[in-house]
Amino acid sequence: EAQVTQNPRYLITVTGKKLTVTCSQNMNHEYMSWYRQDPGLGLRQIYYSMNVEVTDKGDVPEGYKVSRKEKRNFPLILESPSPNQTSLYFCASTFSTGPNSPLHFGNGTRLTVT
Amino acid sequence: DQQVKQNSPSLSVQEGRISILNCDYTNSMFDYFLWYKKYPAEGPTFLISISSIKDKNEDGRFTVFLNKSAKHLSLHIVPSQPGDSAVYFCAATNYGQNFVFGPGTRLSVLP
């Protein structure tokens, strides 16, 4: 089954404790991205990657890191999480950038930083 | 400043009637627009899209209209069904470099 898989689904952590949220897709998609969803703000892009070893900042990259060493994986790293990073996170991928190539989303990771 | 706006946080419609969800954008460089539907505890799923060279795209009960001069698009659902109850996100992109999403509209279809 074609899918984007995020882990974990739920995560509670404390300020400053490094964490990684994994994202993997099995569709051979070139483009992958991370979003956070907050009430009233919709989905805001954190980072995106057009291909292996190519990553770029989205609209809200501060406090996050990503890497794209393999085509299928795009982990999101919070080196020193803070309470304002409490949010619902979505990973997404698509085959190529352009028309008729919508994003496929994972089921989300709800992160709470205390 | 939000580049994609959905000014109605919520909308309630009777089953069988038309649902109209609206979206406005500010960036004239956007050339492709999409609508996503999101159920609780799931990721958004793609619903329908439209290229900036068109003014209408239809897929079954779903039709998206684009008015480029007004920088406005709308999603029409006819007839509305209870299973359509979800949060709908409007999104825009400039050749996929950066997908920008609106804040979403929660649609409730009442039986």
Image: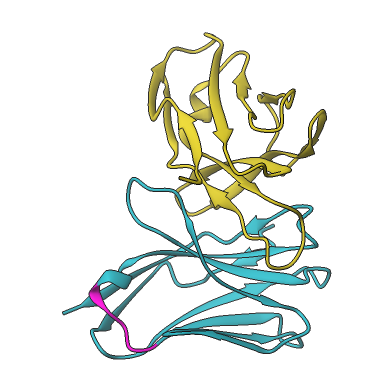
Chain colours: A yellow, B cyan
Q: Where's the N terminus of chain B, which quadrant?
A: bottom right
Where, by quadrant of the figure, is residue B86 drawn? Answer: bottom left
Image position of B89 with respect to A9: above or below:
below
Q: Position of residue B46 (x, y in %)?
A: 52, 63
Q: Position of residue B89 (x, y in %)?
A: 51, 63
Where, by quadrant of the figure, is residue A53 drawn? Answer: top right
> Is B80 included in the stretch rendered in magenta?
yes
In this rendered view, identify the residue nearer to me: A24 or B55: A24
Q: Position of residue A87 (x, y in %)?
A: 47, 35
Which residue is most to the front? A1
Which residue is most to the top? A17
For the image shown, how many numbered marks are present on the structure? 0
Residue at 57%, 75% (x, y): give it. Answer: B23
Q: Where's the C terminus of chain B, which quadrant?
A: bottom left
In this rendered view, identify the residue nearer to me: A30 or B10: A30
Residue at 77%, 62% (x, y): give it. Answer: A98
> Is B71 included in the stretch rendered in magenta?
no
Q: Horizontal placement of A46 versus A82: left or right?
A: right
Where, by quadrant of the figure, is residue A70 drawn? Answer: top right
Image position of B19 with respect to B6: above or below:
below
In this rendered view, identify the residue nearer to me: A40 or A7: A7
Q: Main secondary structure of the magenta part?
A: loop
Q: Position of residue B58 (x, y in %)?
A: 54, 86
Residue at 71%, 32% (x, y): give it. Answer: A71
The magenta span reads B78-82
Image position of A21 with respect to B8: above or below:
above
